[in-house]
Image: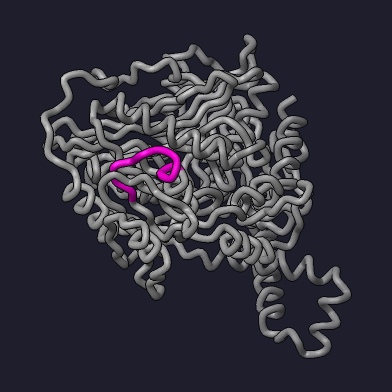
């Protein structure tokens, strides 16, 4: 099921405060400030510089844990999303991203010092974030610098990203762009990254530098040797857990041993200090004008609700008044509320331009929403999902006066939306948008084998239309066992589905739980829209469990189906994400 761990209660003493930090020329970075007033204060504040692209998405959970751990050690921590990443403004194709990212770190430094009242700053960076932190430290003085598996040579890093890109079946349509793992590097951004060579930089580190190597790789002495050549005090430590931190979101493992090394090192090299007499943070609120991100077509703000304000989301609102419903987006797998490949951010902002407010939020135990004490963390199908959904609708109604709602979810988010729409009463839900669902009825301990069978069948049905696939089979390049197994699965499933179809048609009160849910949604006048990528098994899974209800829904118009050609499960390619936005625009309009 993935890496699920017990987590501290939201009342563990750590304050977590979100803020947008705007720029005069427009746009803003997004930050989270972590502090623990009960901890023994140290005269240091940490700024956490994340990686970019898929490494940013995968490491998000571990970076949040690091910020919490530092705060408990008396070192407040600020984590940030650079412009064009995460919840910040901008896109992958913005101009001069390298300069903007360095400016973001400098802005975060200033804000962190004002928030905390501390005089010293520790920059902590991971992968390309470590390189950016180092480049900032070559321009302005910092007190402490932590570089975790840094990109020492930008050209080598680009070759790694190109290798990832070659595993994709499609090529980006962006001019001269490199699309790697669902994120785009423009030609200009690639040029900026290619100029990175930390072995040629002179660093202005006042106290000490820590270089963290991966324990599963041999240590590279080049950067420490360069620091020694510059006569800069430094330490080099190999720590475990990097691969677990960078696993797919639902399988991530927080590298606790590595986080302990960082915190212990930062405490060792920062003096104990009396708590600051005055700081920017008062009574849990950031006294900063950047509480809202303002753009020409929309504005965004962080929304906190639920028990002890533990649930977190970003509300995107159109700038003009609109009577259209608000769209609520649920976590896809264990990816936090920006969505796989940042797709929820793109969707929310595009839909806001059409007059639809959107809330993308984290269920308890996912992303930035901290679960109650003893509850599991990082579970794509949490027990409290429907209850959390109801809390989101209540918060939208109470705080912003929204009266009508649309629920939208990708993958496990579709499952959340499906059950929340059935179970939530008292809120007028007009539509349910299910994107690439993999199950409609999750039960703890359920095997994914059934889903894989659907995926195998879909793959071989598509391959059967290809002459090249038949040639491979006839030449013995493909073992016939797997296609035959998929065929057997298809025949068996169709027989069961045909029996259920006849039963449901003859006995109206009968039917599977999914059939009953579809009937209830129709009775509640909630339109169900199913959007499925080419080759994804969502429609087949729904038909297998509720064939008669699906046929009736498609005929009466209570169920709509839209395929997206050329897209994979999480819309990894930019052109497929654009196609999804266009599809939703058409459906909602």
Q: Position of residue 441 (x, y in %)?
A: 50, 51
- Relative to 428, is 40 above or below? below
Q: What residue is drawn where x is 65% and y is 51%?
A: 190
Magenta-tinted stretch: 136-145
| Residue 553 quadrant | top right
Residue 546 in sight in this render = no
Question: Quick check: 99 left or right of 281?
Answer: right
Where is the C terminus found, in terms of image quarters? top right
Report the front residue among 580 and 557: 580
Q: Position of residue 125 (x, y in %)?
A: 40, 49
Q: What residue is drawn where x is 79% and y is 84%?
A: 473
Q: Hey, which residue is sitting farthest top in the picture?
A: 321
Q: Position of residue 45 (x, y in %)?
A: 27, 36
Report the front residue among 229 and 28: 229
| Residue 218 quadrant | bottom left
Q: Is 16 in the magenta?
A: no
Where is the N terminus found, in terms of image quarters? bottom left
């Amino acid at each position: 099921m993935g890496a699920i761990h017990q987590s501290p209660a939201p009342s563990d003493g750590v304050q977590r405060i979100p803020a947008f930090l705007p720029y005069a020329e427009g746009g803003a970075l997004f930050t989270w400030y972590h502090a623990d007033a009960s901890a023994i204060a140290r005269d240091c504040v940490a700024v956490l510089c994340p990686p970019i692209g898929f490494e940013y998405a995968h490491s998000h959970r571990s970076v949040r844990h690091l910020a919490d751990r530092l705060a408990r050690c008396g070192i407040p921590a600020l984590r940030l999303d650079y412009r064009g990443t995460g919840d910040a403004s901008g896109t992958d194709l913005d101009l001069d991203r390298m300069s903007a990212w360095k400016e973001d770190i400098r802005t975060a430094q200033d804000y962190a010092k004002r928030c905390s009242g501390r005089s010293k700053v520790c920059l902590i960076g991971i992968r390309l974030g470590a390189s950016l932190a180092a480049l900032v430290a070559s321009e302005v003085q910092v007190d402490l610098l932590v570089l975790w598996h840094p990109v020492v040579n930008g050209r080598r890093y680009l070759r790694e990203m190109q290798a990832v890109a070659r595993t994709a079946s499609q090529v980006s349509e962006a001019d001269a762009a490199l699309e790697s793992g669902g994120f785009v590097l423009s030609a200009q951004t690639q040029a900026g990254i290619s100029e990175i060579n930390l072995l040629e930089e002179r660093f202005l580190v006042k106290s000490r530098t820590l270089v963290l190597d991966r324990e599963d790789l041999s240590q590279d002495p080049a950067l420490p040797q360069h620091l020694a050549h510059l006569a800069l005090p430094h330490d080099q430590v190999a720590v475990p857990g990097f691969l677990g931190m960078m696993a797919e979101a639902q399988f991530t493992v927080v590298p606790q041993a590595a986080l302990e090394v960082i915190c212990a090192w930062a405490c060792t090299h920062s003096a104990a200090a009396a708590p600051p007499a005055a700081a920017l943070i008062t009574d849990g609120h950031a006294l900063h004008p950047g509480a809202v991100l303002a753009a020409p077509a929309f504005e965004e703000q962080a929304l906190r609700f639920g028990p002890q304000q533990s649930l977190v989301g970003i509300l995107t609102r159109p700038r003009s008044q609109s009577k259209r419903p608000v769209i609520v987006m649920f976590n896809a797998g264990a990816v936090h509320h920006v969505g796989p490949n940042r797709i929820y951010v793109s969707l929310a902002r595009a839909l806001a331009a059409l007059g639809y407010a959107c809330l993308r939020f984290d269920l308890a135990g996912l992303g930035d929403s901290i679960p109650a004490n003893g509850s599991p963390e990082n579970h794509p199908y949490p027990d409290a999902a429907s209850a959390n959904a109801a809390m989101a609708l209540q918060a939208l109604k109470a705080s912003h006066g929204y009266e009508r709602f649309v629920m939208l979810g990708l993958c496990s988010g579709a499952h959340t939306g499906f059950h929340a729409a059935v179970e939530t009463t008292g809120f007028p839900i007009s539509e349910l948008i299910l994107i690439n669902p993999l199950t409609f009825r999750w039960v703890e301990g359920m095997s994914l084998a059934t889903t894989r069978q659907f995926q195998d069948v879909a793959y071989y049905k598509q391959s059967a239309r290809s002459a090249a696939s038949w040639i491979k089979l006839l030449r013995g390049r493909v073992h016939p066992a797997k296609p035959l197994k998929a065929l057997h699965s298809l025949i068996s499933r169709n027989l069961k589905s045909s029996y259920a179809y006849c039963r449901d048609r003859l006995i109206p009160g009968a039917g599977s739980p999914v059939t009953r849910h579809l009937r209830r949604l129709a009775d509640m006048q909630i339109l169900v829209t199913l959007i499925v990528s080419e080759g994804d098994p969502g429609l087949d899974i729904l038909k297998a469990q509720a064939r008669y209800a699906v046929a009736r829904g498609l005929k009466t118009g209570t169920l709509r189906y839209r395929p997206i050609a050329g897209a994979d499960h999480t819309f990894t390619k930019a052109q497929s994400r654009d196609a999804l936005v266009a599809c939703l625009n058409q459906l909602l309009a």
